[in-house]
Image: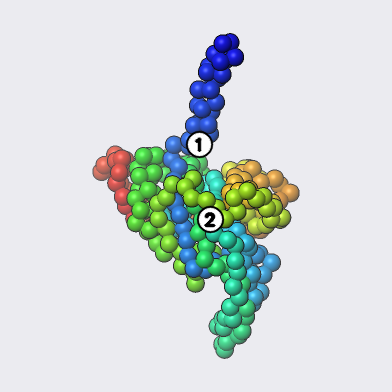
Amino acid sequence: MQNTGKSESTSPKIKEVRILSKTKHDNIVEFKVSGDFALFADVLTRPGGEKFSYPIPTYEALKGILMSIYWKPTIIWVIDECRVMNKISMERKGIRPIKYGGGNDLSYYTYLKDVEYRVRAHFEWNDNRPELEKDRNENKHHNIAKRMIQRGGRRDIFLGTRECMGYVEPCSYDEGVSYYQGTEIPYGFMYHGITYADEAEREEDKGKLTVRFWRPVMKDGVIKFDRPNDIPESQKRHIRDMKIKPFDKDLDNFSGLEEFDFIGGGDDIELD
């Protein structure tokens, strides 16, 4: 009887811990992005004429998709994790890119084929934008982001490059079975993303354009991304100095600054 009582008293605590781990952030968004082709180009082949895709999406590519769905300089999107649903397969195509100096060239691009990813992400406030502090209305941004996911995004969605169109729709992140369920695959040293000056958190990264690298591991089809701020210094490089682009009424480059003059920061006002 004592053992039974002990198990009954501890089981609710275990259940509570699991629930908290799934709701770490209140402003989480979940969506599915799919397409016929994708090209998350390896940085080694990106400058040259022949591009070869990584087997999995990069942090920066998924963040770019979210920014095409909805973005304001008030927020920073953080990709938490991604599920690779379909088998990773590639297709090689002959491309005739136009030369800037005139004429055509011939290159081979290697694309991912028939891709589907389920993404979980959240947003945080951009502390480098104190002038937008009045725009920090979590419910407003979260609700607009969810509506934009239902509509397929505000702007065109691309899977790595412009010729690879993507399609976004809402989903339940945990639904469905990944092709890679029951496997664990390390991918070695890969490109993670770029930290721009206006999103830099660490003091040494402020005022710099910084490129990040990491070593991803896909377990059961799930890739859990390291936060940009958690990437060690040995896996980052400062490319050049960079200034933060200012937003101001006098510059007339962000109409969202004007909404607080006449509505006081409403809960669900959507401006371009």
Image: 123 above or below 194: above
Of residues 107 and 196, the one drawn nearer to the viewer in this rendering: 107
Q: Position of residue 183 (x, y in %)?
A: 65, 50
Helix or strand or loop: what does disc 2 sit on? loop
Total marks placed: 2
Up the image or down, 98 lies above or below 211; here it is: below
Q: Is residue 161 visible?
A: no
Residue 167 in which image quadrant: bottom left
> Residue sitting at 48 percent across and 65 percent down?
35
Tell me the quadrant of the picture where the C terminus can be found.
Answer: bottom left
Q: To which residue does mark 1 refer?
A: 22
Nearer to me, 231 or 219: 219
Q: Is residue 237 left or right of residue 94?
A: right
Residue type for callout 1:
Lys
Amino acid beneath label 2: Met
Residue positioned most to the right:
234
Q: What's the residue at 45%, 42% (across, down)? A: 28
Residue 251 image offset from top left, x and y in percent: 39, 56
Q: How far apart, in angstroms, are the residues tagged by discs 1 and 2?
A: 20 Å
Q: Is residue 94 visible?
A: yes
| 207 left or right, relative to 145 | right
Residue 85's label in the rendered image is 2
Q: Residue at x 66, y 64 (%)?
A: 43
Task: List x then y, in percent, for residue 119.
Answer: 50, 50
